Image (cartoon, rainbow, N blue to C red):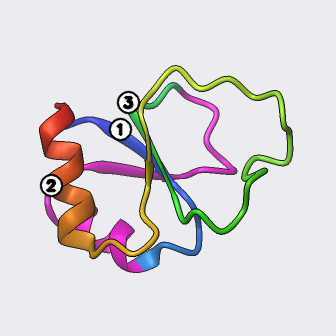
Amino acid sequence: MPRVAIEESLQQIKEYLNSQGYDVVDLKQNVKPVDAVIISGQDKDVLGMQDVSVHAPVINARGLTPKEVYEELSMRF
């Protein structure tokens, strides 16, 4: 399964994706490449740097259920 980095505040989504077999890591502590990034949409500068380039799809989970985030990931992989 793909490796997904996720914001710490999205615990329910993290648990759901783990239960579906995704390798879910904390966004701020991850140093390895990931296949997708999931953000809450609350913080524009989520990594603390405005010039960070991510070479993976970024999914804004704001207003989405854990299942909807899973479905969004499923369409990409």
The residue wearing badge 2 is 71
**33 inside magenta stretch:** no
Of badges 1 and 3, nearer the viewer stands 3
Whether the magenta-drawn stretch holds residue 19 is answered as: yes
Q: Residue at x 75, y 47 (%)?
A: 47
- 14 lies above or below 1: below
Whether the residues at callouts 3 and 2 have beta carbons within 8 Å, the answer is no
In the picture of the structure, the residue carrying the numbered disc 3 is 35
Residue depicted at 35% across the width and 70% down the height: 13
Identify which amino acid the numbered label 3 is placed on: Asp
Q: Which mark is residue 69?
A: none
* Mark seen at residue 3: 1
Looking at the picture, which amino acid does disc 2 mark? Glu
From what the image shows, is residue 30 above or below residue 42?
A: above
* 46 displayed left or right of 25: right
Q: Nearer the viewer, residue 31 or 67?
A: 67
Identify the mark nearer the N-term, 1 or 3.
Answer: 1
- Kindly indicate whether the residue at mark 3 contacts the one at mark 1 (C-beta within 8 angstroms): yes
Q: Dividing the picture into quarters, in which one does residue 50 lie?
A: top right
| Total numbered circles | 3
13 displayed left or right of 32: left
Quarter holding residue 41? bottom right
